[in-house]
Amino acid sequence: MGYTFDEIKSALAAGETVLGMELGSTRIKAVLIMKNGETIISGSYDWENQLLGNIWTYSLEDVWKGVQTSFADLKKAVSEKYGVKLEKVAAMGFSAMMHGYLAFDKAGELLVPFRTWRNTITGEAAEKLTALFNYNIPQRWSIAHLYQAILNGEEHVPQVAFFTTLAGYLHWKLTGKKVIGVGDASGMFPIDTDTCDFDQRMIDQFDSLVAEKNFPWKLRDLLPKVLVAGEDAGVLTEEGAKLLDPTGEFKAGVPVCPPEGDAGTGMAATNSVKVRTGNVSAGTSVFAMIVLEKALEKVHMEIDLVTTPTGKLVGMVHCNNCTSDLNAWVMMLKEYAESVGAVVSRPQAYDAFYFKALEAEPDCGGVMTYGYYSGEPITGFTEGRPLMARTPESNFSLANLARSVLFSALGALKVGMDILLKEENVAIDEMFGHGGLFKTKDVGQKMMAAAINAPVSVMETAGEGGPWGMALLASYLVNKEAGETLDDFLSEKIFAGNKGSKMDPDPVDVKGFDEFIVRYKACLPIEAAAVETLK
């Protein structure tokens, strides 16, 4: 049962609600929730990264402008809707896009502009560290950025006293604590899942690797302290309260949970923190995460290893391209329909395209598409070119085209997932889907189930997203019972009765997708030729 207006108003006035905020790549969003996870109200701020000197970055001025504006937007909404001045909450938490490099000197001054996850400037470092650790270190990881700066001989490196992620930076400034949630930490440096801390053996290896440089620091000295969900991560200080709310109305002393990355908040928001569960986010890009029962047998460059907010090992497949080409096809076909006098809304156009895919041949009838708007590391591409190819014998129908575009949107993901599921024999009981691909009822869900050959569920709450997941982690900090795990808290107190719609894979679809992916991989030289010739 939902709360009444008066119950929400009372909770707001009494400071019993919980705040979650997430800094995404294009939007900063703050949400307030009740004890049962019900969203009350939200505030937001749109922003964009900048390319400065070949580095994708956000200025710290923009960070705080966005945080303050989204919080002010939230306060205004609370005042207008409920007639309450938001002065306190029961708990709060901050999350942000993972990885990247924010390095500070002893005085707490930023040494170089924030290097975000989007940068692909650490190839040499990532390759050498992967070989050293025998553990995949992607280019976007914080340690890859630090080591690349060392390899580049950058002047700032000896002065580094602390480096962290964007969420870790926010938490530090708001609480005075240099700590980080284990999920976000797992995108900085490998985690030892037995200790839920940075892997000491690898830290020692790194220190030995750079020993000849005689830096005035050891790696452990530079890293934040790792915490798991539910642990004490400090409180909002007087200085932090003024940073968050320059009006001075919002009070200090609020408990703040460990800061997390957007992967961890996505897991919380989809109730996929248990072993053998996973979630897949499918929009402009697509990534899937599965909570693993055990470590992988081999190192795979296609698989990132991160953790849940409680430190369980997670295998992640991250792909740069998903729905951009699908959107382009739908808009082009909508334009054609309108040119012959039809009146078609955007939702109608998408639904027609999606449902047409259900009429197609299981393997798309020989129609091949690639939705590579940008490079795709999973398949070895640093640039992309959207294209469609077929033979004269291919059955080029609208249905087969639609299914090919949908399959292709998940093509790179399937390549990576097949490594986990078929080479590493990872088991999945259920995947939870969220994102734009799943908006048309059943179709995206059906295609995803075919791609991974596992049940896919879509929950009504999945659209709430990362800020809501962060608020749930903050709620867990203050509302958990003694000994209650995050798994149980989410399943029994937040998602109880909200099972969503579950769809099992259709064997015909699975076989069709397996046949399609064989052609998809065999035809990659066509994509390579397009990159080379279409300048």
Image (cartoon, grey):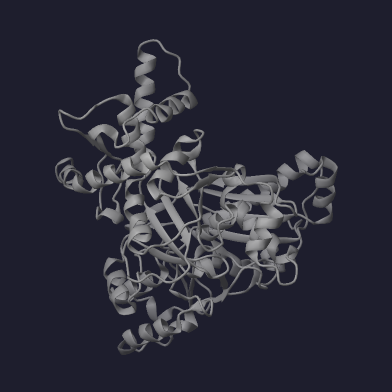
Q: Residue at x 53, y 64 (%)?
A: 275
The residue positioned 39% from the left and 64% from the top of the image is: 304
- Picture residue at 48% right of the left edge, 21% below the top: 345
Residue 425, placed above or below residue 10: below
Query: Image check: 434 left or right of 130?
Result: right
Q: Which quadrant: the N terminus?
A: top right
Front in this rendered view, residue 145 or 47: 145
440 vs 90, left or right, is left
Q: Is residue 333 left or right of residue 80?
A: left
| Percent position of residue 112, x then y | 41, 68
Q: Nearer the viewer, residue 402 or 13?
A: 402
From the viewer's perspective, tell me whether residue 117 is left or right of residue 366.
right
The answer to which quarter of the image holds residue 335 is: top left
Q: Position of residue 21 (x, y in %)?
A: 61, 55
Residue 199 location, x and y as percent? 45, 80
Question: Front-most of 243 and 162?
Answer: 162
Q: Quadrant of the C terminus?
A: top left
**203 relative to 145, above or below:** below
Asked whether the viewer can see residue 246, the reply is no
Quarter of image, res 114? bottom left
